[in-house]
Image (cartoon, helix red, strand yellow):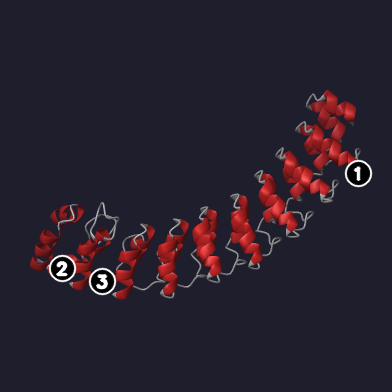
Amino acid sequence: MADLFDLLKNGDLASVKRAVQNDPSLLSATVTTWGTTPLMWALLPDSMGQTSIAQWLIERGAIPKLKNNKGWTTLMIACANDQPNKAQLLIERGAKVDLQDDDGLTALMLACRKGQPDTAQLLLDYGAKRDRRDSNGWTALMHACRCTQPDTARLLIERGANPDLQNNDGWTALLYACQHNQPKTARLLIERGADPDRYDNKGKTALMYACEKDQPDTAKLLIACDAKLDLQDNDGWTALLYACQHNQRKTAQLLIERSADPDRYNNIGKTALMYACEKDQPDTINSLIDHGANLDLQDGNGWTALMYACQYDQPDTAQLL
């Protein structure tokens, strides 16, 4: 078997032909500890395999539906390595486009998370189910957004992928797009019906993630699309609280100007003003005060904003309060 492995690595079609003709059982044999068949190896990128070898193996009866030890099929391997021509060959010879590996991944999911729109387009044209879920509830669109692949995300959206499906953790494609600073993809998702206020299992919305990750452009987009500013997650945090706690001054200013509640507090009783004082954010503090923030609110430990300013040795902030 090692000899066949070497022949495949070298792309030696004539020698592969002789080996298989002498022993036809090699067509379904494994040539690596991962359970890789000769056809799977031939479907790797051209530096490691040859389309001509793959085509000949299929013509000789190699089975495209066989899986390796991870549950990957030959089609999955071709798609994960951006080999649309080889993928088309496999599909035309009977490979099933929607088979799933041990983690529930499909060929379409693999193509989308690797940013391979041509391969994804091919699979969709051959009937791949765009909203199929993996074992964690992820769709191809979620994979594309999580892996920052705007081209495959756009393709899926334009082909009708559901933008509001949630995975096992409650995440949507929009949540991933916003967490990973993809405002263009986020806009397209919202235009196609994604709910800007849908939240994950922690109660966090797209706006909260944008504020937590310092993404003012994405936050501005969500606000312009009427995302609710004062929703609270399971720990009582709002978008404004995240912006102030993470010292995101531009985003905080935007939220305040759009009338986010300055006195909304989280489960430990802390307000945006307290976080701004703790982080020494004079511009944000001024804006919060100008928009009516209550200076004397106390958190769960009885601390006020002034106490936080003094605790963190910020005399200018203390004087302002």
Could you tell which of marks 2 and 3 lies nearer the N-terminus? 2
Query: Which structural element holds mark 1?
Result: loop
Gap between marks 2 and 3 measured at Cα:
12 Å
Quarter of the image that includes the C terminus: top right
Q: How many marks?
A: 3
Q: Which residue bears the numbered disc 1?
A: 292
Could you tell which of marks 2 and 1 lies nearer the N-terminus? 2
Query: Which amino acid type is shown beneath numbered disc 2?
Result: Ser
Q: Is residue 87 left or right of residue 171?
A: left
Q: Which residue bears the numbered disc 2?
A: 25
Q: Residue 140 got which mark? A: none
Q: Is residue 201 left or right of residue 320?
A: left
Gap between marks 2 and 1 measured at Cα:
79 Å
Gap between marks 3 and 1 measured at Cα:
70 Å
Could you say which quadrant of the image residue 287 lies in? top right
Front tag of 2 and 3:
3
x 72%, y 37%: residue: 247
Could you tell which of marks 3 and 1 lies nearer the N-terminus? 3
Query: Which structural element holds mark 2?
Result: helix
Query: Which amino acid type is shown beneath numbered disc 3?
Result: Ile
